[in-house]
Image (cartoon, grey):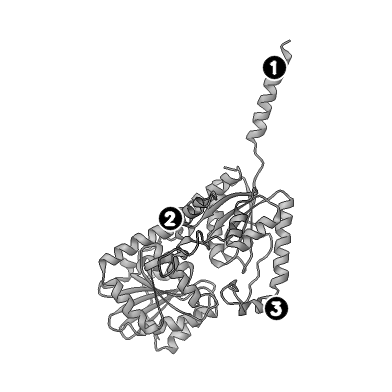
Amino acid sequence: MLSQPIDEGRERIRLTMVLAQKPALNLLLVSNGHGEDQIAAKVLRCLQQLAPEHHYAVLPLVGEGRAYRALDAPFLLDGQSLPSGGFIYMDSRQLWRDLKSGLGSLTLRQFQSIQGWARDGGKVAALGDIVPLLMAWGSGADYAFVGTAKSDYYLRGESGFWRRASDYYPWERWLLSRPRCRGVLVRDSLTCKGLERLGLSNDYAGNPMMDGLEPRINLETLLEISPAVLKLVLLPGSRAPEAHENWRLILKALAGLTSRPVAALAALAPGLALESFLDLALEDGWRLESQLPPGELARLDPQIKPLRKLNQSLILTQGAYPEALHWADAALAMAGTATEQVVGLGKPAVTLVGAGPQFNESFARRQTFLLGESVILVSAPEEAGPALLKILADPRQLGILAANGLARLGPPGGAERIAGKLLGYFGAE
């Protein structure tokens, strides 16, 4: 008579133990671009720290995925660089070049690899825009989406009026509302509220762009720049050869700032050839200084190049990026993610229109919608100097820009919060 209750009790204990031993999560992070790879890598690092018992893999759809290289996660498929750098939607002329370089076959292999991942029971986190989202949906796997490209701030434009109910198109919202879509994370609170009004459940957990920007050394103390000197960070973008043409425009803008002493740090992406930027600066009349900057800065970046021209000093660096952003009063920028990070730190950025494929007029104008009054778009290099001096002379406006940057980019810690949300979506906290 007593055997049945005892057996039932043992069965309950056994089930409890089985449920407590959840199977490891197999999560694939799919991203589609240099900036998206950087965001995904930050999230992946936090996932590995928060839940090291799970298994993670990565798939960069555009480029070689260098941002992932320092992390212990396998590539589902090796990345491949394409002529457009992934910006065919900004310059359709690049599409044919990408197709000739194997875009079609690469996309097919990527999709097949994700389908194989799904068949083995893996889950997918798509980071970026509709391209990885479509891949995730088409794979048949449960998926989550981290939207880095869309924002309702884009809808206001120059007029300040909304052009649509949401920056996410109806077909994108359809993909985000499927039962296999376990969660949606958007890039700012404004977009989150907009989707909620349309009945789409989503979360805002911050923006990983603002993570990892803590300075390792204090350039303010090291360089001892006078308060009368204008401190600038120069951001020509991360892709050659476009970044070289952007650099020519930035040097022209600097030439129009001789009315005030300038100290500038050019924060160049590690994947670029520093010598190319040095050669262009020398052609522009800059001369290489024999005396190196203080040792602590030189140790941080042994390849650093100091230059001088008239009353301006310039340092080319590929190893002091966060330090440069914090040190500068403002930026001359022709970049995507880097410009957003400047704004997120509460600083103004003057941007110039380039030839593309990324930083063309369309991209630059959309960036002013996204970042608001923190970005001043000028049509010619000689307009950059006066625009910078005007805004830096207005303390009240600088206070407004600081608040604007925090509202649009959020505080640090976004990557960890997003990682926690992703684990929750898949029941793997």
In the rendered image, the vertical position of residue 6 relative to residue 332, given as above or below: above
The number of discs equals 3
How far from the left and from the top, in percent, is residue 423?
A: 57, 46
Q: What residue type is labelled 1?
A: Ile
Secondary structure, mark 3, is: helix
Residue at the image position 61 percent from the left and 55 percent from the top: 174
Quarter holding residue 105 = bottom right
Residue at image mark 2? 412
How far from the left and from the top, in percent, is residue 23?
A: 67, 41
Mark 1 in CB contact with mark 3 (< 8 angstroms): no
Mark 2 in CB contact with mark 1 (< 8 angstroms): no
Residue at image mark 3? 100
Residue at image mark 1? 6
Mark 2 in CB contact with mark 3 (< 8 angstroms): no
Q: What residue type is labelled 2?
A: Pro
Quarter holding residue 30 = bottom right
Q: What is the spatial separation of the Cα atoms under label 1 and label 3, in whole angstroms?
A: 70 Å
**Quadrant of the frame with the N terminus:** top right
Dot placed on the residue nearer the N-terminal end, 2 or 1: 1
Residue at the image position 39 percent from the left and 86 percent from the top: 286
